Image (cartoon, grey):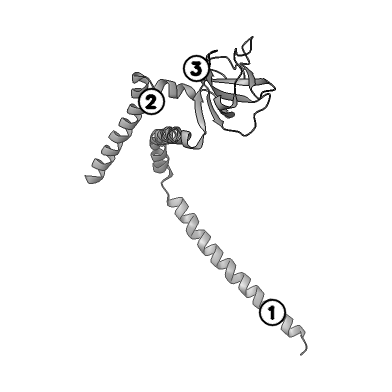
Amino acid sequence: MKYTADDLFLDETDLEFIFIKARKKINKYSKKIFSKLIDIDYYYYTIKILQNIPEAFLITYLGFFATFNLLRYTETSYGNRFYTIVTPSMYPEIKPGSLIYSSPSRNYKKGDIISYVEKTPQGIETGKILTHRIIDQLPDGSFITKGDANKDADPKPVVLSQIDGKVIKIIPNIGYIEILSKTLPGFLIIIVAPCAFLIVRQIKIIRSNIK
C-alpha cells in the first residue's frame, strides 16, 4: 500500500488539530490557575507567616534539643558520644563552648583527636574526659597525647581501653546551650520558657476557634 500525498496531508492535519486542542486546554487551565493566584489575599497570608515565625523557630529549636538529648540517651549503647569542651587546651582547633561528636574507631593514629578517660599516675580513673590530639605512638601500642594549646604532652600515655572515640565533628558554640541548660536559671530560660510560650499560644488558638 502506497503512502500518498493526501495521506500525509491528513496526518499533518490531525497532528495540527491535536496540537490546537492541547493548546486550548493548557490556556484554559493556565487562566484558571492565574485567576486563583490573583484572588489570593497575599497580605493576609504574609502577616500569618510572619506571626508564626517565632513559633516555628521555637518548635525547631525544641525539636533539635529533644533530638540531641535522645542521642545522649542512646550514645552509650552505640558508642557514639557528645562532649562539650569548656577549656582552651585544643584552641584554635576546638574553641571553648564547642560541642564535639566522637565515635569509636578500630585504628587510632598520630594526628587524630581523641576523647579519653583521664587516669592518675597510679592508674586510677579520675572520671574526667579529656579531648586531646595523638602526637606519637609507643612500641607497646599506647599513645602520647597533647592539647594543641598546651606546652607539654599529657603526663601519662593513653592505652586503648581509655579511649572513648575519635572526634568526627566539631560544632562551635552549641555547647554553651548544654552548659546553661544544666543550671536552674538556664533551664528555665532555655527549656521551660519556650515550652510555656507554645502552650499558652496553643490555648489561645483553641479558644479563638471555639468562639
Q: Amino acid at mark 3?
A: Ile
Front one among 1 and 27 = 1
Determine whether label 1 and label 3 are within 8 Å by CB.
no
- In-image side of 166 versus 190 (left or right): right
Query: Relative to 37, is 85 above or below?
Result: above
Determine whether label 2 and label 3 are within 8 Å by CB.
no
Depth-wise, is mark 1 or mark 3 nearer the camera?
3
Dot 1 or dot 3, earlier in sequence: 1
- In-image side of 38 versus 164 (left or right): left
Q: In the rendering, which numbered label is found on residue 124?
A: 3
x and y percent of residue 115 in the render? 56, 24
Q: Residue furthest top?
A: 151
Depth-wise, is mark 2 or mark 3 nearer the camera?
3
Q: Secondary structure at mark 3?
A: loop
Q: State the separation of the CA atoms marked 2 and 1.
A: 72 Å
Q: Which quadrant would the N terminus be assigned to in this image?
A: bottom right
Q: Amino acid at mark 2?
A: Ile
Q: Secondary structure at mark 2?
A: helix
Q: Badge 3, how many Cα within 10 Å: few under 14, some, many 20+? A: few
Dot 2 or dot 1, earlier in sequence: 1
The image quarter containing residue 100 is: top right
**Residue pictured at 59% horizontal, 29% vertical:** 166
x and y percent of residue 53 in the render? 42, 35
The image quarter containing residue 112 is: top right
x and y percent of residue 155 in the render? 60, 12
Q: Residue furthest bottom?
A: 1
**Residue pictured at 30% horizontal, 31% vertical:** 196
Camera sees residue 76: yes
x and y percent of residue 72 in the render? 45, 32
Front one among 16 and 112 = 112
The residue identified by callout 1 is 11
Q: In the rendering, which numbered label is found on residue 190?
A: 2
